[in-house]
Amino acid sequence: MVHVYNCHPFASQQIVQVEQEPGLVCCGGGALFVVATGGCKVEAYSLDQEGCPLICRFATMGTVRSIQHSKIGDYLVTIEEKNSATYLRAYTNWRYQAEEKSRVGVRLLGHLLRGASMRGGVQMEIIEIPLSERPVAVACCSVTGDLLVGCENTLVLFTLKRQNQQNLNPSQQTVQSPWPNTQQSSSQNQGQSSTSNLNFSVLDFERSVILHLPKLTPKQVALCAGYVAVQADLEVLVLKLDASSEPRTLEESPDSKNIADDLEDQTDFLLIPRHQELLGDRAQDCDIAVSIEKTGLEDRGQYTLSYVLFRRFTPEFFQGCSVEETQLHSLQLHPLFTSNQSVSLEEPACVFCFFSLPTAGYLYSLRGGVDLLSTYQYPEKVLQAVLTDHLLHVITRNALQCFTVRCAAVAARIEDPYIDTTLRACPPCSLEVCALRMQLFIGLRSVRVYDRHVVLLSTADTETPEETERTTQRRSLSRKWTMSSPKETSTAGHGWNLYVVDTVSPLTLYREMVEYSQRYAETNPQAQSLRHLLGEAHLLLRAALLQTSGRPQSGDCDPAASLQEDADGQTEEQTAARADRQELEEALRQNCAHLGDCFSRGSQKDCHLALPYYRMSGLSVAEVLSRNRPLPSSPHFYGPGFLFYLKHYLLEETKQTIEQESANEVIDIFSQSEPSELVSVCASPPMINLSPARTLQILQRLEDTAGVSVPLTITMATMMLRLNDLPEYTQLIGRHAEMQLVYGFIEEPRLLLHGTGGGLQTHIRPTALTEELARSQPGLLVAAMVALHENSKVQLEQADHIFKELGCENCLQVDFWEAMLMASSQEAVIQELLFRVSSVYIDRLTNTNSETHSGAQRTPSKHRSLKSADDLINSCSHYGALYPWLTLLTPAYTTGFQHLEALHKLQSLLCGPSLSTGAVMPLLERLSDETLWGFSLHLLCATRRGQYDSSIEKLLDRCPQAIIAYANHQLQDRNMSLWWQKLLPELCNRTRAAVDDSVLLAALQETLVVVAMETSPAEFLELIPDDGSASYFLPHLLTCSQRHMLA
């Protein structure tokens, strides 16, 4: 379906004063090129100046049958005929003919002019491009400047090259380099001519690759950024040609071997092909085989070919068209760049393919998957069509028509990945197209477009009465288009005219669309046509913004020649461009506001689009509220899109706050429309300014009707807290058990924290309720924070930030870590927490120890931990039971309760299975082993690391009374041999040196008892020292022998 809107896209028109009847026209580089009918002369007119004055004229070497302009390299390419032969020629430096230079160089492809031919400096050159077959169609790539030539059954690709030459030394030539994406101007060439005697560049082409298509005869070809399109009478084939750095041998396609036989077999039959559309990889299933013949001499790489699109139409009788007239035309590949692309990047963000039948046009997107974007149904037979960023211009015999396009919708989604989310939106690519007002002419033959200039060639051919009547009937049967008055032809009396019609700026057309949309808004604000027209205006602005921020085009001129011009004009151009862009952005924001209004009141299907459009509009909540207040006839009705916007805006974490009046209005809206959302609305950070007393009344009414719920109770308690009514707050909080309150916080985390919706970078902050819980109910706060973390409502770093904001980083934060160790099952989190609590325990031990020695009166913290060491040992698997020998190393007196708790917790962690001693050893270096409790920690680490020999020696040195308890606990199983291999020899040596040490003697007796129980009599005899007293060891030997006999 095609919508029709009475918006006029044309601003003015003028007639180009040409002397002879134009046969061919093309435009580019700010110029209009006109070839007289049957003539051998090209005239160039300036499109950027009023009246289109003549730039230059030059003769061609034959009768021009086709002409194309390339903006890259600013050259013309023609197909010419002379003496029944067809030639392909390129004309470079044609602007120098404006300086009345008669010198013209003629050369073959790849043969540069040297010597006396170049002593005059830069001059116009005619490059003869030899071909083995007759050229049928040509196309220039608007991205690279390469040239594609369509012959009978082949496509020949020529790569544009730039040769640097020094006039003073003709034999010297530099390495070739690709031509930059630039567009020459006459003034730039004039500036360059001053240095042309020293060094200048000339264009040349290299035959790069040949594509053989035996089953297809090209009528039109197109080339853009590696995409190759070829069009026959009723077939279109699009290929992607990529250059690969790895050379390989080409294999002939198996299908191409039998092509000649197939064609010979089909000569006796009239075959009507079936309609076919193959997209993407499926296009290779078409019956058109393509083979590659590489011809480039300098490029050592290999080309790879992939099928992109194939479309075949069946000949039919269309309205107003015979079967013979049903042929494809207007093949075009159109690139589009986005603003986030690099300036030097030559790959467009998206490429579009357009082609047309007399009654329908088709627009495809080729990048990121091949999709049919739009189908244009024409009301009359269309002769030609040209696709631009903003519009599709088509001509019938007597009218110029404009259709909207969807290129901007595709480019916007490539440029911005957040489109089609709750952040940003754009009308869909599948949005139905619309037609704007048509402009009547007489006898249109061709159309060309450059920038905002539409060039039309008309010829007033005489029609028979039958043709006139048929045309009139056909027009009456077609759709009723809004037409402007036909323009009068030139008074010169000839039967042809060359028009230049200027289109209005996108901003002007947008404003007309907005004015046109007001008619729908006044009669039916929810009309689909209003939404469609605003969507068209949105895409129009997006296309204009892409054009203003697209890849800049720099001239290929001598910097010294243009330095003064750049200094004078750059600032003014930048200022004007910046002002234009700001105006477009402001218009886009206004359009987003209008679209937000449409979707806010629209159906449930599309109501979610109100949120991103209102966001893009930059409107505040108060402004959105004022635009969505219900009409007096329906005082309690709010659109679903508006409620969707409010809910999601309030659910998100934003620093913007709503004023009290607007916040109260929001509460009223939800109390009427969605009372179940009141708790979430009250907990939203932007609603911090709402009236607590008024809100409390609404919440109490909700409780009376919906019943008691934990989140509702907590919300009411929060309102009481804001009213400083602590008794009522305490009464409300006391309604539910602690675990029920924890579940309430899980259901609505924003009652405790603001800023939980984002990632680590989100600025998170506590609420007033959080501060009150930290003061009066710290256990509830810690339990709630643990539950929020385990339910992925808050991250560990965010929780740490909350406790720091509360000033509890040395108390409640540690309690939170200890509680997390009990609840968490994530190994990475557990190891991080173990390291943190170990650091805290060591800090507490270090601080209390240093303060004791220095006589300081300050204590680390008066806060008592929520969990004691015994509680953690009994409830957390990461805290192990204290080894029995540690009680002998822990003195009965300490510096305080916190010191003893920190010591026991750290010892318990070292006795547990989870703490890595390698991670905690660097921290323990801060603790001295001069004290027994400090020595116990170092001894624990050494034991955990398996250093039993050194641990026994150190323990005998520092606290020998603990050696038997240590050995009984640690020297078991595989370490049992250390009793007689290490402990017994140590005790014997030390007892020999200190005969009267009762502690050592008792330890020796206990050791001998264990050794006698674990060894054989022979082994025991070997362990007795040579100087030992037999009477001392004999009872233990007897015990060992008796045990051995019983065994």
Image (tube, rainbow, N blue to C red):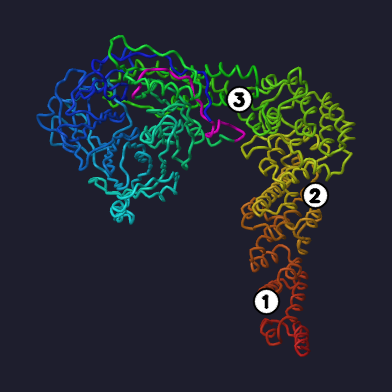
Residue at the disc numbered 3: 595
Q: Work out whether residue 344 can be spotted.
A: no
User: Relative to 368, is 31 on the left or the right?
Assistant: left
Q: Which residue is mark 1?
A: 977
Label 1 and label 2: CA atoms lie apart by 40 Å
Marks 3 and 1, the one that precedes in the sequence: 3
In terms of secondary structure, where does tag 1 sit? loop
Of residue 799 and residue 483, the one placed in the foreground of this image is 483
Whether residue 592 is visible to the viewer of this picture, yes or no, is yes
- Considering every residue shown, the one lying at the far left of the view is 116
Q: Residue type at mark 2?
A: Lys
Where is residue 410? Give x, y as percent.
49, 34
The total number of labels drawn is 3
Which numbered marker is on residue 867?
2
The amino acid type of the residue labelled 1 equals Ser
Mark 3 or mark 1, whichever is nearer to me: 3
Q: Is residue 93 above or below residue 900?
A: above
Foreground: 815 or 460?
460
Tell me the chief SS of the magenta region: loop
Quarter that holds the C terminus? bottom right
* Residue bounds of the magenta highlight: 421-445
Q: Is residue 715 magenta?
A: no
Disc 3 residue type (three-letter): Leu
Question: In the picture, residue 728 is in which quadrant?
Answer: top right
Mark 2 or mark 3, earlier in chain: 3
